[in-house]
Image (tube, coloured by chain):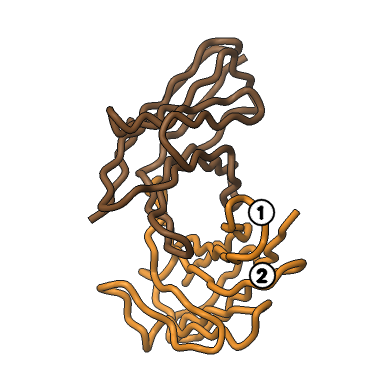
Amino acid sequence: GAVVSQHPSWVICKSGTSVKIECRSLDFQATTMFWYRQFPKQSLMLMATSNEGSKATYEQGVEKDKFLINHASLTLSTLTVTSAHPEDSSFYICSARSLGYRNNYGYTFGSGTRLTVV
Amino acid sequence: GDSVTQMEGPVTLSEEAFLTINCTYTATGYPSLFWYVQYPGEGLQLLLKATKADDKGSNKGFEATYRKETTSFHLEKGSVQVSDSAVYFCALSVGAGNMLTFGGGTRLMVKP
């Protein structure tokens, strides 16, 4: 079945540094990538939607200059948290969507990245 | 806008008990409905789905029926196991290629 590989699974970084999270679709082409953020014991909140080769569309309240999303190819999307601060500590999950692939009605989730900023 | 409401947890059951997790929705269009499961420290996995009214999604003993008249998609399982302990999310999507809208999640704990 379809697989999205998300790395790293966890990362600890110092305040002020940047962290890059990668999501790769291993056996299908991800025309759309959704990036979610999940706070402890809460639901997933959509941060942004990106289509391959286009600029990402950010949800209201999400700083596009802080959360840089790149979807340069159909198999790779990255989220970079720039100048991270402790309040950015969270669980980040990507979800790939492929309209033409018969998998899970088209949504495949990565395993998530737990970011801790100290 | 679209929204999903599901019962708050945690839900604590003994092994082999019957499980129901309620989910209701509001949508501007005709949604597809999903249940996702999240095990500790992992991402979400699709559990089951239904794309039209009266469809029943089923997987691993879990079932949910798309009830348009009550705008509901309740998750049920006849006999839960300890390995079913996880967080369950109800979600909807309207239109092809659109994002998923999630409910708040319900934590299920099954005790032996």
Is B45 situated above or below A83?
above
Residue designated by label 2: A7
Give the chain coloured orange.
Answer: A
Q: Which mark is residue A103?
A: 1
* Residue nearer the viewer, A34 or B13: A34
Which residue is drawn at the image coordinates 36% and 33% (left, top)? B23
Regarding mark 1 in the picture, which secondary structure is present there? loop
Provide residue A114's location: percent of width, then percent of height. Answer: 55, 62
Give the crowd class for mark 1: few <14, some 14-19, many >=20 residues within 10 Å: some
A71 horizontally vs A84: left or right: right
User: What colour has chain B?
Assistant: brown
Which quarter of the picture shows residue B98? Answer: bottom left
Quarter of the rendering occupied by the N terminus of chain B: bottom left
Chain under callout 1 = A
Provide residue A54's location: percent of width, then percent of height. Answer: 48, 88
Looking at the rendered structure, the kind of residue marked 1 is Asn
Is residue B96 in sight in this rendering?
A: yes
Which residue is drawn at the image coordinates 50% and 38% (left, top)? B50
Looking at the rendered structure, the kind of residue marked 2 is His
